[in-house]
Image (cartoon, grey):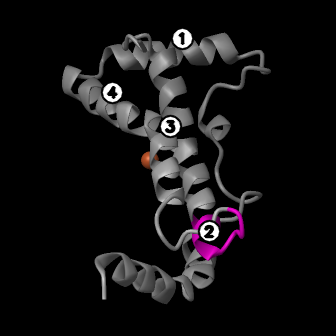
Amino acid sequence: MSLKNIRLEVMQFLEKDIDTLIEKYLIPIDKIWQPSDFLPDSEGEQFFDEVTEIRELAKELPYDFWVVLVGDMITEEALPTYESWLMDVEGVDQVGRNPWGKWIRQWTSEENRHGDLLNKYLYLSGRVNMK
Ligand SMILES: [Fe+2]
């Protein structure tokens, strides 16, 4: 048996539990948090005051804090690469939408929320060169 066949058998073995795992660990889209829940409301009258507060608080945070968040941001920005790679793994059926494809899509949307929130926070903080 080749390594490729073993990998495929493992993926197929795990596939039977994915729907249960999705139900157990991934919160449905209408119930999950959104980045806007943690950011100033740009439609609200307090928006600029809230941004000012973020910037004032950010001034007190140490250099190491920003280094860690920048490292996190770089990782989050690579999300399209992770999803492309995962969708190409043997046993993942992107077209037929088998449970692996469903898991990867939901995982990607979860990760995208992290990146979206972190990006907006870093940007609003005024402490990080986003480029
Ligand atoms: Fe993440």
Secondary element at image label 1 = helix
Q: Earlier in the sequence, mark 3 or mark 4?
A: 4
Q: Secondary structure at mark 4?
A: helix
Within 8 Å: ligand 1 and the Cβ of disc 4?
no
Measure the C-alpha gap from mark 3 to mark 2: 26 Å
- Judging by the rendered image, the residue that carries numbered circle 2 is 93
What is the crowding at mark 1: few (fewer than 14 residues within 10 Å), some, or many (at least 20)? some
Q: In front of the other: label 2 or label 1?
A: 2
- Label 4 amino acid? Val
The residue under label 2 is which amino acid type? Answer: Asp
Place of residue 96 in the rendered image (x, y in percent of width and height, measured from the top left): 72, 70
Residues in magenta?
A: 95-103
Q: Three-letter amino acid code at disc 1? A: Thr
Q: Nearer the viewer, mark 3 or mark 2?
A: 2
* Residue 9 % position (x, y): 43, 86
Q: What label does residue 70 carry, if any?
A: 4
Of badges 2 and 4, nearer the viewer stands: 2
Q: Label 2, secondary structure: give it.
A: loop
CA gap, disc 1 and disc 3: 22 Å
The response on whether ligand 1 sits within 8 Å of label 3 is: yes
Instruction: Work out which residue is located at the far front of the displayed protein and give it.
Output: 1
User: Label 1 belongs to which residue?
Assistant: 52
Q: Is residue 118 left or right of residue 68?
A: right
